[in-house]
Image (cartoon, coloured by chain):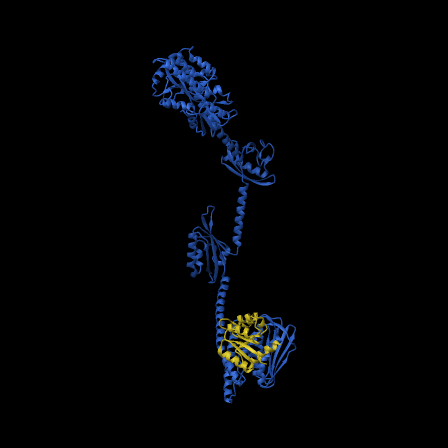
Chain colours: A yellow, B blue
Amino acid sequence: MKRKILVVEDNEQNMYLVTFILKTAGHEVLQAYNGMDGVSMAEQYLPDMILLDIQLPKMDGYVVSRILRKNPKLAKTPIIAITSYAMPGDREHALAAGCTGYIEKPINPETFIGQVEAFFKAEK
Amino acid sequence: MEKLPRRYLLLLVVALLSLLLTAWVPPQAKRVFRAGFYENPPKIYTDEDGQIAGFWPEILNYIATQEGWQIEWVPGTWEENLARLQAGEIDVLPDVGWTQARSEIYTFSEETVLVSWARLYIPPGSSIETIIDLEGKKVGGLINSVNFDGPDGIKVLAEKFGVQCTFVGYKSYDEVFTALENREIDAGVANKDFGDQNESKYNISHTSVILAPASLRFAFAKDGEQTDYLLQTIDADLVKMKNDQKSIYYAALDEYMGGNASGTVVKVVPRWVYLVIGYAGGAILLLAIIVVIVRRQVVLRTASLRASEERNRELVENIPDQLYRVNSKGVLLDLQTSHNVSPFITIPDPIGKSFTDFFPREIAETAREKLSATLSTGQMQIHEFHLTVDGTEHDYEARIRKSKADEVLAIVRETTEQKQAERELRESEERYSMLSEVAPVGIFRTDKDGLTTYVNPAWCKISGLCFEGALGNGWLKVVHPDDLEMVQKNWQKSTHENRVSYADYRFVHPDGSITWVMGRAVPEKDAKGNVVGYIGTITDITERKKVQELETAVMKAESADRLKSVFLAKMSHELRTPLNSIIGFTGILLQKMVGPLSDEQENQLRMIQSSASHLLNLINDVLDISRIEAGQMPVANEPFDFRNAIDSCAAKIKPLIEKKGLELIEVIPFESLEIVSDRRRVEQILLNLLSNANKFTENGSIKIECSVKKNTLTTRVIDSGIGISKEDLTLLFRPFTQVETGLSRKFEGTGLGLSICKHLVELLGGKISVMSEPGKGSEFSFTLPLKGGTK
């Protein structure tokens, strides 16, 4: 089932990687390279899911999540934080900021799509 | 006032008459004199018919008649008349008191016509009796009169007596008396001739104050054209008149001055009469003044005597001393106390009674001993005794002095309060001393120069020095050499500036052990605030210092550890970002998402993937183990669904397992199970065990089994892999050990995974264990408390 997924990620290679995997799995991908763009694109295109990197320039992922959660149209959209295992407390903060769940970096191409799709399953 | 028109009428008549006369009379016509006139009955006044009458007009008219003069009376106030005479506007003014000052302005007749003096008059009921009583009062008088403004007048007199009063000048005695009658003034001065006749009319009374005796004469204008003539003529006529008892002079005296005025009569002949009267007047005046002065003295003396008596009385009543006269047999002869009652002899009429009658036996005996000692030696003896009087405790001190051969005087004073204070002080001192002896802190005292004078036992125990050794500057010998300079400087500064001293320093004991102390000293001051010494404490803070040192060490270590953690976190993050790409893209290629690969390409890509994964795991594991070893591994204690966690892990591992052709079996007896723990760590443990199982299993299955018993959840990961030998099982959970299988490095891994798992399980309050048989597989199991656990 084709989904519209917004990826907010500042690292170009990671963006390429994630986009490639998602597209290969047959999903439509929207790209935002910073938090501000992430917010505006989410509000404009109302994606089915948002993959949100936490360490972003200008506006970090927590702030993006909080802003998006205030929008009624995005209140139930899965927001998946891409957290860094190295930074303790990232996950807790992410959930507190309204994220639905998290996927740990670095992503594993073999399991990544399964993880993403598991959130769609959980949604139902 | 109604007299005025008459007076003018009269003047008009006289003026017309004089005009007529001058018209008629040839050149040697009558001389005309202008005489000043003012109201001063009975001496000079306007009578009921509007005629100018009185003693002076009578005489002057007589002389004028004798000499063929014509008198022109010019009315005015006393003050106006004096001014007119000075200005030469009138030729003569009767009844002017002679003074030195006036004699320079006016020419006086040689002959004294009357001797008079003034009196102080008061409204009825007034308490004024003497000049002293005029203090602060209002006193009226005739302006420019001898008795008011003159050298012996009331103003000068009051000043001489040092009496401060207000003076109010009036234009006539009539006005003065009216003012008195109306009580506008408190006292008024008038000549007694006026006063004697008029005081009853004005309803006022006189005082005994007599002043300004004056020789009343005729006064003439100083440089008047007719002055010489008038002077000679009037003087000559006066002499004649005074020498003739039947003259108009005496008749006028009788008529106007009356019997009261007999003393005022001045006769030229015989001369002694005048002298006697003069002396008498002077004597009376002198007496009056003396009376006034004496009165004043008496008043003052009386007041001071009364004050003195009062003081003495108070002194006697309040004096704490009681006097007892006692004879050699101890019999009380007399006593003198504030109310002639002894505070401690309670029997009635104690005079004549002996010691044994009013003292308890013991005190009586001592009293008798002291009594005989006083009498035999002549030396004063002190007898202190304690008595219960009316239920309260009292202390007394008797000083016994020999007063006669067989008599003593005992001066007794109550000393209860003093004794009580002494007792309290002693008790306080004892308490202080006891406290100092038993206190666990070291206490020391020094003199004002800072030299030690006392140390308590605790001080000795703490410093390791004996009492004697501490005295003076002896204590400095056992101060740690490294602290000595600081302690000395600090102590010198404190004693120099008289301020509170603080210092932490060390004592070295004879056995070489060291005691840290916290020293404090405050200046000790006497009642006047002068520093008399210092009192201080030392507290053993050795333990505290040790703890402090440890704390410092720990803090240092902790800060180093924190630094390490931050460094590792940063480093691992920076390493991981490129790794992310490497692993990701390698994975994509290997999944042939991009396109087909040759076998060799695939083989080499797998090598890249393997190395990258190994590097990633290494980074993560190093980070974990370093955190665990530093005790810095944060562990959450939050509720989550354990089933959900297992599913999440299974999802991750499933692709890998299935890729190897293995089967993942889940035996989980619950759809969901909420436990309180750290989800992330639990998943880390599960994943570690599952990937290990996957790693060492070539065929068969990997099974996840869960069971709940009481409050414990047990999770087992069972594989059908190569298994582990017994010897290796013991090394399994140590870091950096991977079981040597003979196929060294065949299995990727850091060798840290199980070690981390063990730590994590224990951090979460559980236990991890392993059962294995080589060739048959392994079973790893760990427990978790359902409701969370502590480390």
Of residues A111 and B553, the one nearer the viewer is A111
Of residues B17 and A112, the one nearer the viewer is B17
Q: Quadrant of the N terminus of chain A?
A: bottom right
- Residue B708 picture quarter: bottom right
Of residues B697 and B392, the one nearer the viewer is B697
Q: Is residue A69 above or below residue B62?
A: below
Question: Residue, x 48% and y 19% (percent of image)?
Answer: B196
Q: Quadrant of the C terminus of chain A?
A: bottom right
In the image, taking residue B671 as reference, residue B97 lies left or right, namely: left
Q: Position of residue B385 (x, y in %)?
A: 55, 40
In the image, taking residue B217 as reference, residue B605 lies left or right, namely: right
Q: Position of residue B606 (x, y in %)?
A: 51, 85
Question: Residue, x 53% and y 54% (percent of image)?
Answer: B438
In the image, taking residue B286 as reference, residue B677 lies left or right, namely: right
Q: Is residue B280 above or below residue B140?
A: above
Residue B744 seen in this snapshot? no
Q: Position of residue B281 (x, y in %)?
A: 43, 19
